[in-house]
Amino acid sequence: MYSTPDSADLGQAKVYIDNDKIRVYYDFGEEKKLWVPEVMTKKVYEEMLLPALSSSEKRRIGRFYPLYSKDDKPEDYNSKLKKYPVLEKEALYIMTDELPERFYEEIYNYMVEIGYEKEQYLEDMKSLGIEVAEGEASPGFKIPVEYKLDNDGFSAKVLTSMITDKNDSYHLTDIALLSGFNTGIDTENSYYLVPDGSGALINLFDNKSGSFSKVLYGYDYTVQKNQFSQVAQNAIFPVFAQAHSTNGFFAIVQTGDEACTLLANKKGSNLSNNIYAQFNVCATDVSVTGESLRIKPYNLYANGYIKAEPEVKYVLTPEHTQSYSAMANYYRDYLTKKGDIEKKKAQGSIPLYIDFSGVYEKKDSFLGIPYNNKIVLSTLSGINSALDYLYEQGITNVNIRLNDYTKNGQQLNAGTKLGLYSRVGSLKELEALADKLEDKGNTVYIDKTVLLSDKHSFFGSFYSQRDASKRLNRTIGIKHTYDLVIRKPEESINSQYLVSPKKYEQYAQSFLNSLPEIKGMGISESYAGQILFSDFNSEKAYTRSDAAAELEKVLEQYSKDNSVITNTGNFYTLKYSDAFLNMPLTSSSYLVQDAQVPFCQMVLHGSIDYAGNAVNTAKEPKYMILKSVESGASLYYSCIEKKDGELINTDFEKYISATPFDNSKQEISELYKKYNEALSVTYGQYIKAHEYINEFVTKTLYENSVCVIVNYSSQTVNVDGTEIAGMDFAVIKGYNN
């Protein structure tokens, strides 16, 4: 259904104006007709209905329902007899054919008054052998949308709390908001900005066609999905835009972003170019429980509409919409005014982040008896030695994250306390490590998640039947690892229960209570910025918006007395995070995209630290380094203390992506020194502009007039008199071009 042909053009849209607000009630489809009986038995008519009516009402109802019998035959008796053969045996009161529908409400109210319901009517007709044709119901909805003018554009909000259904047989699942907005402008030198990964551009001035679709913040794992169609980056910022010299716009999804899918179409796949936000206002799923028995699947729907009222702000001022650089500057200022981010104080060096994994639990056997073999990958004393090495090299701005430090190793266990495994180290050693880092202004982060759990126990803090999220079909929610070749779940490898959002705060508080009061110790909630899912529990359901709100409560708890980091950087974690690791520095490189840009990094640089994937485990380390240079990211490594030879005959790489520190320490030292010497001048500075000089060369300009040029080609290039070797970069201070 579309608002213009299916509502406005039919005269079914009502407009109300209140100062700077306009509210439009879009009325789709026909009103549901009131139920009235076509036929009444003498018992219903004479014993139930007539005693409840006044004299005038009796006369009116008599005109509506004349009596038909063998002794009292109106002119059309024979035609009625063909339709109702039971007239041979029983007298009936039958609705006149000419009765206008405007009287239906009056009759319906009489039926309500005497308590004669449709179900009883159908039973009566069945006993008389009369078939009742109910007719095919048509879909219909009333959807109010509120438009509000502001200084730099307008906003549009869907008032989900006021949506009404005209027919219970149909479900409203998605609303595409302003899908036709700004579709008719000249597209010369115009492009769409989409928040895929770091950001991507879709040119509108070429002859290519295609479409783009992206769910904000990643896939909802509580929605049944037996196959992934692609492996892609998260869309971490709730924005989209069309850049144009005079007629562009920059859109911010202010609420309802957790239920939002961004869509864009280029000519060829659509009648015209368009980009818009679509909101899943009622979650839906497909039951496949009878698939093995060849039972036809059926649709499942959530109860009611989402409580969050989707709202999109459209910025129209030309100075903010001419380019993605202008949009990034606007959005940074917007978030700063909201209090979501603040300017960072510049310091002498760029932070270095290193993960250390503590324990790997391997299934083993002894004399045919299975047991869990705990392999210690890193110890606190070994991490301390690694830190000493870096300090000796003059690298002092180091932050450590400790992963897999409990006796369960890589297996997640929601609801548990700190639980430092004794062979990894003691609390005293942890305190010593934290003190050493704190003396340099740095932190050791303890990784803990409240979102996932590998293990469960009826008597434990997490029991899946009680504490896990549920799907719409009431089965337990599980996050599977997907086979990258066949793109289907590998149920036997690294699958975890999805913890219900109702448990987040409780588990977080339990973990906080177990932490010793150690300065220089922070918390890593790695999955909080990476995944977001619903809980369709029949007792109390949580939408993705509800789940994000619960996660924000957890991060707020953590951030009161601790530094907090997370992975990826989904927007709802922004306000409480000090750094993002594994943040996407590229887009997903869909065919419809023409360029990837560091839009998210342009917004955050100078306010929040971030790093891409670990350099030492990246498929193309050199490329990852250059992307870090281009986007102003910190360097990040994932390490273990264990030597390569000690990990023979283990499959830890299926679960843990890391390399021995001793194998990487020289590379870390040499690369960081070069990186920091060249780029420390940019730390704490806003990125003012970014552009492509050509297909392989980018330019990033900072507010202090430092320009960073990155050459991704294999050939030397000359930019403004500066030569940059292939697969290298240059930093120019006092840049004026």
Image (cartoon, helix red, strand yellow):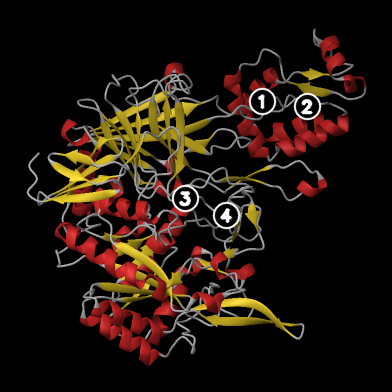
Q: Nearer the viewer, mark 3 or mark 4?
A: 3
Tell me, yes or no, whether the two marked residues, 2 and 1, touch with CB atoms within 8 Å: no
Q: Secondary structure at mark 4?
A: loop
Q: Which amino acid type is shown beneath numbered disc 1?
A: Lys
Residue behind mark 2: 132
| Quadrant where the image shows the C terminus | top left
**N-terminal of the two: label 2 or label 1?**
1
Q: CA distance from mark 4 to mark 1?
A: 57 Å
Tell me, yes or no, whether the two marked residues, 3 and 4, touch with CB atoms within 8 Å: no
Occupied quadrant, residue 113: top right
Q: Residue at x 53, y 64 (%)?
A: 500
Q: Return the mark for residue 218.
A: 3
Residue behind mark 1: 58
Q: Nearer the viewer, mark 3 or mark 2?
A: 3
Q: CA distance from mark 3 to mark 1?
A: 63 Å
Q: CA distance from mark 2 to mark 1?
A: 26 Å
Q: Return the mark for residue 94.
A: none
Q: Position of residue 150 (x, y in %)?
A: 20, 37
Judge from the rendering whether residue 610 lies leftward or rightward of residue 709; answer left or right: right
Q: Return the mark for residue 222.
A: 4
Near-viewer residue (729 or 350) = 729
> Compared to 654, does 104 lie above or below?
above
Q: Position of residue 154 (x, y in %)?
A: 25, 35
Q: Position of residue 520 (x, y in %)?
A: 28, 80
Using a 10 Å C-alpha cutoff, classify the residue at mark 2 as few (fewer than 14 neighbours), some (14 to 19) or many (20 or more).
few
Q: Secondary structure at mark 2?
A: loop
Q: Position of residue 20 (x, y in %)?
A: 22, 34
